[in-house]
């Protein structure tokens, strides 16, 4: 029997979810901002039902917080939240890179170089938000080529928060792109050379430096609008 399945168009809920997710990740909405179902339904031109369902999905991704009888809010991380997320992210990314090295070294390296080229292009001629999105794509490469769906699923569970923190908290920092580019080039270099211990060191420095930057912004109450 041939495969007779047809590709289904995205549901309205999925479209609304994607639009709201992008708005949070790309800093169109502030961390901690109150989200009104009525206002969102008007802005999106849809009824409140798909908005409500999309917000419930985003809560599962950790991007919104729904508090009964109080309202719905864009997630607002504490220093402890960010510290735990950075440690978890380091654990996932280092293991994913090991799997890439063992199972798909050439393909992973090619994809990393392609992502690095895109980052360089946005640094030269794009906005800081364009650079943040390209940075996100670079790290997603590890999980696209690691050959372990459980690692990929674990990363997808936190990737929205990682991307949002990158955009909200590191994009405005002076000199951040230059430091970031240097670290990403070094990641590619050490992966290409098969120096996993050095790669761990670079990645740890990269992620923990981001944590220091995030924590400093949070302590100063300087989360950008």
Image (tube, grey):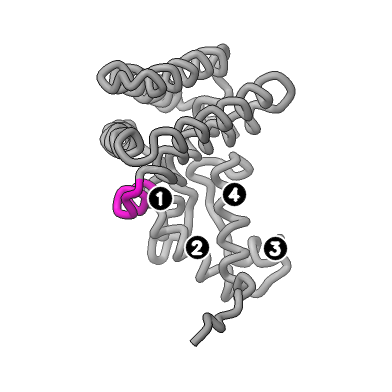
Mark 4 surroundings within 10 Å by alpha-carbon count, few (fewer than 14), some (14 through 19), many (20 or more): some
Residue highlighted by disc 3? 44
Answer whether residue 164 is visible to the viewer in this image: yes
> Which is in the foreground here, disc 2 or disc 1?
1
Asked if labels 1 and 2 touch by Cβ distance under 8 angstroms, the answer is: no
Q: Which sits earlier in the primary sequence, circle 3 or circle 4?
A: 4
Q: Position of residue 120 (x, y in %)?
A: 63, 22
Q: Where is residue 45 in the image (x, y as percent from the top left)?
A: 73, 67
Is 51 on the left-hand or right-hand side of 106?
right
> What secondary structure is the magenta-colored segment mainly?
helix
Residue 168, above or below 160: above
Residue at (50%, 39%) from the top-left corner? Answer: 164
Segment colored magenta: 147-156
> Which is in the foreground here, disc 4 or disc 1?
1
- Which element carries disc 1, helix, strand or loop? helix
Q: Which sits earlier in the primary sequence, circle 2 or circle 4?
A: 4
Real-space Cα separation, disc 3 to disc 4, in angstroms: 13 Å
Residue at (62%, 64%) from the top-left corner? Answer: 15
Could you say which disc has been placed on residue 156 in the image?
Answer: 1
Asked if labels 4 and 2 touch by Cβ distance under 8 angstroms, the answer is: no
């Amino acid at each position: 029997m041939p495969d007779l399945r047809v590709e289904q168009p995205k549901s309205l809920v999925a479209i609304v979810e994607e639009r709201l997710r992008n708005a949070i990740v790309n800093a169109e909405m502030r961390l901690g901002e109150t989200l009104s179902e009525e206002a969102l339904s008007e802005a999106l031109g849809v009824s409140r039902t798909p908005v409500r369902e999309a917000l419930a999905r985003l809560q599962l991704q950790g991007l919104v917080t729904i508090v009964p009888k109080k309202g719905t809010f864009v997630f607002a991380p504490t220093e402890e939240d960010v510290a735990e997320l950075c440690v978890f992210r380091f654990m996932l990314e280092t293991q994913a890179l090991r799997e890439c090295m063992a199972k798909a070294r050439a393909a992973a390296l090619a994809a990393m170089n392609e992502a690095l080229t895109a980052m360089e292009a946005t640094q030269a001629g794009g906005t800081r938000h364009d650079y943040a999105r390209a940075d996100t794509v670079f790290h997603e490469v590890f999980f696209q080529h690691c050959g372990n769906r459980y690692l990929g699923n674990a990363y997808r569970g936190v990737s929205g928060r990682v991307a949002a923190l990158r955009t909200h908290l590191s994009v405005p920092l002076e000199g951040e792109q230059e430091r970031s580019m240097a670290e990403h080039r070094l990641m590619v270099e050490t992966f290409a050379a098969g120096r996993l211990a050095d790669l761990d060191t670079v990645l740890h420095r990269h992620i923990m430096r981001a944590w220091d930057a995030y924590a400093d912004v949070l302590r100063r109450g300087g989360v950008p609008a």
